[in-house]
Image (cartoon, rainbow, N blue to C red):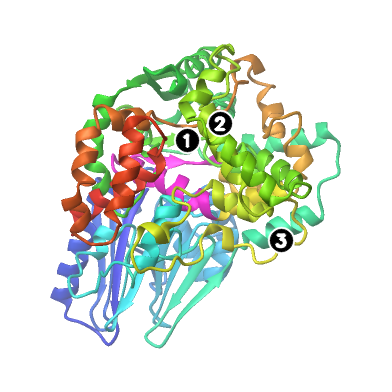
Amino acid sequence: MCGIAGLYRFGGAAAEELAATIRSMTDAIAYRGPDGDGHWIDAEVGIALGHRRLAIVDLTATGRQPMASADGRVVITYNGELYNAAEIAAELATSSRGTSDTEILVEAIARFGIDGALKRANGLFAFAAFDRNARILHLARDRLGIKPLYWTRQSGTFAFASELKALRTLKQLDFSLDLESVATYLRHACVPAPRSIYRDVMKLMPGERLEVSEATIKAHCYWDLQAIARAGQTNCDRRSESETIDELDALLTDAVSRQMVSDVPLGAFLSGGIDSSTVVAMMCKAGKGRVKTFSIGFRKQAFNEADNARAVARHLDTDHTEHVFSGVDALAIIPKLASIYDEPFADYSQLPTYLVSQLARKKVTVALSGDGGDENFGGYVRHQNVPRLARLAQFVPRSARAVAANVLQCFSPAAWDSVVRSVPNRWRPRHFGEKVHKAAALLATDNSPIAMYRSLVSQWQEPERLLKNTTEPPGWSERLPNQVGLDAAAQVRLLDMMGYLPDDILTKVDRASMAVSLEVRVPLLDHRVVEFGWRLPSRTLIHGGKGKQPLRAVLARYIPPALTERPKMGFGVPIGEWLKGPLRGWAEDLLSPRMLAADNLFDPAVVRARLSEHISGRQNWQGALWTVLQFQAWRRENR
């Protein structure tokens, strides 16, 4: 995995200026590729491509980038891994200079064209390829959005980079705050693509490529997740359960085995849940040596999965390493978050994600993760609750639902937690009080699954009340203009996969892992596995009060269900308690009237009221407060 950057000054530029500029861009993201850098310049055309290398496959000089095709026509800078490089190489049937997948990709573009190469590619990637004959720059991002790519066109210059900090080295460009993006950030705790936090900087969408010339910029969708989901749900798989499980087992075995190709040490994140346990079981099945696994624990038992991970590791006989995460660790990491994420980002599982990445990097350079299993196989609680509540809401007037919601919200989350305190720990619902309050919010909304989803994923239900003089643009829930052919569970899954997965989950993992120069691969997001998942009806994925049933069935072939079957926990942290304790001084500083007045963006009265209610224990506003805190920290870092 690497960091890439480039610029295209239409009409040409001085070689010295291009060389200095592209080097400053790649230097800004050196941690994404500490094993070397490379630059390619064509001053007459005005283009410069830059690369920072994290050497994973082909550690020799033949793997260096930017890399030109054998005929010299296409030059590429590439961040990613191809898992079917051998098959594409066989189709090319040409002699190779080295063993890197970069060479395979650039030759595939030269031979098959950009669309032909993308159609064949199985992997995670973001790249820029310049066609010297046509003078066209092609940018592309992988199908699910695992790797990031930002771009901007201003004042006769087109520029792109893996992260915003590389673009910010271009001092002549405008980096004005996009207030509409701030509004969607407050709702979603991240900035949904294609927007960025800056008005004139965009993100390439998952499954999208960009064609850039002096005259035009054209966007093309080369892999349409909506179309795949609708087609799959229209023609669902009707085979027996055993046949379905056999195919999924074979698919996962192949996907994991392909993603274990590496010339450097490799391991896996292990939480002890369904997804990561499945990935690790498949790694052990591949028989490529004892698997190294890494997990994070918490002193607070409600957030601690270390015991479960340890039990799975023991059963699979992995080389297991764990670390107990504390408020002290949080205090050490929090000052780094604004720089690491480079854009306001407020999923507080960013803290343990960074720490487990740091832990793994001490022993490996590549780690496999179980991300994507919930979105692909219906694993989130909302995939069950939204359809249930939407059906209920059809028969209960909204006024009656609003009364019920008010009753449920009369008691604090802590009070609701005390109701289930006597339930045995293994079966006790995690964060029960928070879930009751979320359910209450759903009851008060419109009865459509989309409206309920919007409520569930919102940290601030009405960002425009907090943010002055700003209108909120469309977000994740507006990405399904037509729900025909999709039941309620499928609608929620698709929204998660189109928005929450790339904008939140995969962004979190990319920034946290690359900050410590660790490559993370996600075999459950092999596009063949995703396409398979969309051919399964919701009743196959979700029944018996549990989601991910096909994945559970596969895992049961390798691990006793007793080791992994428990209430879903998630990669959470006790951030709410920390804000009352070790993080309180930090929070009070960033949310002081003086700091809030610095940009005159937020209504100080609203923010301070929520901080007071949270610290007193009257309400749990941890999510809402964390979004403002992370914005304030980012703004201080990048003012």
Instruction: Give the magenta-colored segment's residue range.
Output: 499-523
The residue singled out by tag 2 in the image is 279
Mark 3–mark 2 distance (CA, rounded to whole Å): 32 Å
Classify 10 Å Cα crowding around label 3: few (below 14), some (14-19), many (20 and above): few
Are the residues at dot 2 and dot 1 in contact (C-beta closer than 8 Å)? yes
Label of residue 368 in the image:
1
Which residue is located at x 40 percent, y 88 percent?
Answer: 215
Label 1 element class: strand
Is 627 drawn above or below residue 136 in the view shown?
A: above
Left or right of 254, for residue 598: left
Q: How many marks?
A: 3
Classify 10 Å Cα crowding around label 1: few (below 14), some (14-19), many (20 and above): many
Q: Amino acid at mark 1?
A: Leu
Are the residues at dot 3 and dot 2 in contact (C-beta closer than 8 Å)? no
Label of residue 483 in the image:
3
Label 2 element class: helix
Secondary structure mainly formed by the magenta segment: helix
Position in image of residue 614 (x %, y %): 35, 35
Q: Amino acid at mark 2?
A: Val
Position in image of residue 411 (x %, y %): 51, 30
Lower position in the chain sequence, tag 3 or tag 2: 2
Are the residues at dot 1 and dot 3 in contact (C-beta closer than 8 Å)? no
Viewer-closest of 558 and 394: 394
